[in-house]
Image (cartoon, grey):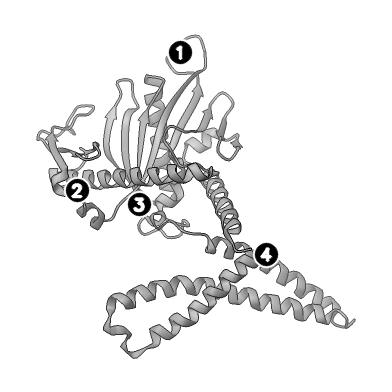
Amino acid sequence: MKPFLRSQLERYAQRHGELDFLLSREDIMSDMAQFLKLSREHAEVTVIAGRYARLQQRESDRAAARDMLADPDMAAMAQEEIASAEAELAQLDAELQRLLLPRDPDDARNAFIEIRAGTGGDESALFAGDLLRLYTRYAERQGWKTEIISESPSELGGYKEVVIRIDGAGNSATGGGVYGQLRFESGGHRVQRVPATETQGRIHTSACTVAVLAEPDEQEAVRINPSDLRIDTYRASGAGGQHINKTDSAVRITHIPTGIVAECQDGRSQHSNKAQALKVLTARIHEKDRSERAAKDAAERKGLIGSGDRSDRIRTYNFPQGRLSDHRINLTLYKLLTIMEGDLGEVVAALRAAREAEQLAELEVGAPG
């Protein structure tokens, strides 16, 4: 294990002891806020300290086995123990590296995904519908729930714009929250294929933009100054039929200082639409702040995954070749049709692994010499 990582682990082990002492004091329950804060920190530190203790134990086991190699009667057993210890040590080393990486508190949150048709006209709108299906199917595989917040269907199918909410509550087995898994989907998505309306078999190129926003909690939404909001109600539009609202239940909220707009029309009441629109608005304001910070950081260093700017062309979907290419990490997979049915796990894992590798490199650069 690299020295700078071991020094961090030593600090975690020391902090674990400090927290054990603080939480054992008789007066700790007199300040419930402090108790809860320390308890949360203790839970996080315990995981790292426990894995580090196991690493130290296996290092000790390996050293003891090496000492036994000189004894002919014990050499075979010692070799087995050394091999076992080294295999587990490699796993522990990788696990601890991941645990030490700085975590974005938003990663555990639910998410909104905004998909907008771009260049390519009707074909772009159809591709937006395909992307919606992709993310919905992926969410189903993860045991997540999805709901459409707002939509603007196109005349030939697909969407000019659609916003969905993905809720990962109740499924902690998927390795993080919705935003943490899907955040790197933000950017420009390009499709190359022969449209259904193309009579001469020519391949067309069109594009959509995707933005993944972390869902804010209720307190963040409340913190927006009501005087900064303009709230309009209108009758929902859509494909027609019995599902069209007969009352002005759709809600559009404008944040006057920034000009950011959010709307919701798919809820059952004006009240629920307003609550959802306010969450989307807060998420967009939060994302604007995040993007501005990322742009500032990018001026100092160029990230492997990038800032997630929606104008970045991050991925190409080439249907004639059955190929998906993610340009940020030079990932190419020839399984496009299964990916479009929601089999996005390999792509998500590769992007997260690339980000973790970048973070680890940053930690090493920033470590004291």
Whole-angstrom CA distance, mark 1 to mark 3, is 39 Å
Amino acid residing under circle 1: Glu
Place of residue 137 in the rendered image (x, y in percent of width and height, measured from the top left): 42, 42
Q: Is residue 310 above or below residue 348?
A: above
Which residue corresponds to mark 2?
A: 275
Whole-angstrom CA distance, mark 1 to mark 4, is 54 Å
Amino acid residing under circle 4: Ala
Whole-angstrom CA distance, mark 2 to mark 1, is 43 Å
Mark 1 or mark 4: whose residue is earlier in sequence = 4
* Left or right, residue 97 beside residue 262: right
Q: Quadrant of residue 277?
A: top left
Mark 2 or mark 1: whose residue is earlier in sequence = 1
Label 3 packing within 10 angstroms: few (<14), some (14-19), many (20+): many
Report the residue at 13% width, 32% height from top.
Answer: 235
Image mark for residue 90: 4
Amino acid residing under circle 2: Ala
Place of residue 224 in the rendered image (x, y in percent of width and height, measured from the top left): 20, 50
Which residue corresponds to mark 1?
A: 198
Secondary structure at numbered mark 1: loop
Whole-angstrom CA distance, mark 3 to mark 4, is 33 Å
Mark 3 or mark 4: whose residue is earlier in sequence = 4
Q: Is residue 106 above or below residue 28?
A: above
